[in-house]
Amino acid sequence: MSNTGSANPHDDIAEILIDEAAIKTRVEELGAEIGAAYTGSDSIVLISVLKGALVFVADLMRAIPRNVSIDVMEVSSYGGGNTESSGTVRILKDLSGTIEGRDVLIVEDIIDTGLTLNYLTGYLGGKSPRSIRIVTLLNKPARRLVDLKVDWTGFEIPDKFVVGYGLDFGEKYRNLRYVGVLKRELYASAIGEA
Ligand code: 5GP
């Protein structure tokens, strides 16, 4: 049976994992912690990884009580509509400014296998920043394939495919205000289930 989902994205959600209020509280905490960690730095650049981290970076940057600039990269590690990392990272959009001598904070939506960030930290490290740190809204430690130092994590979540608050499935569900688990029948065919 083919299932393309409902007109209202909320109707395709099996379970709300992290609600809007919990996200708001945690983003405020992360902003305060990050602000405190960069005392003395006036050249912080938040590098957001599109498109999933778009919503998170918009909220996080307003929660950091110091001067920051932003840049965006777009990378693709999953094929459209897929739920498994391919391990191959492609840069779809590179930085627009230089990061040499700057304090880079990579802002990610979710770390799953870690392959995307592992590639990105190597790539950005080659551009001579003063420092590179990582903040991720969500972390799935159970699925990690590479060893990564993550400086700030919003929430550790179980090994479930989640959408909302920027995260998509087939480009949908990014506009949900919460992080939720998609109904299994909607992505079953993408993971090889009947
Ligand atoms: P990694 O390279 O760490 O395996 O994958 C990171 C990327 O995979 C994320 O930036 C995100 O685009 C995607 N991803 C991993 N897990 C999920 C998930 O549960 N839901 C969604 N929507 N994307 C995910």
Image (cartoon, helix red, strand yellow):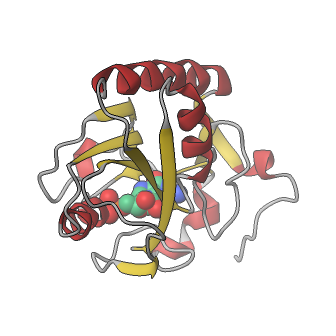
Report whether residue 108 is seen. Answer: no
Task: Using the image, determine if residue 101 lies above or below residue 140.
Answer: below
Q: Nearer the viewer, residue 85 or 94?
A: 94
Q: Which residue is painted at 49% across and 34% down in the image?
A: 67
Q: Nearer the viewer, residue 137 or 42?
A: 42
Q: Horizontal and vertical percent for residue 111?
A: 34, 51
Q: Horizontal and vertical percent for residue 19?
A: 63, 27
Locate residue 59 relative to residue 85 in the image: left or right. right
Q: How many marks?
A: 0
Residue 138's image quarter? top left
Quarter of the figure that contains the N terminus? bottom right
Q: Horizontal and vertical percent for residue 121?
A: 23, 60
Residue 141's image quarter? top left
Task: Using the image, determine if residue 94 lies above or below residue 155.
Answer: below
Task: Using the image, determine if residue 152 lies above or below residue 180.
Answer: above
Locate residue 138 relative to residue 57 in the image: left or right. left
Q: Horizontal and vertical percent for residue 7?
A: 88, 59
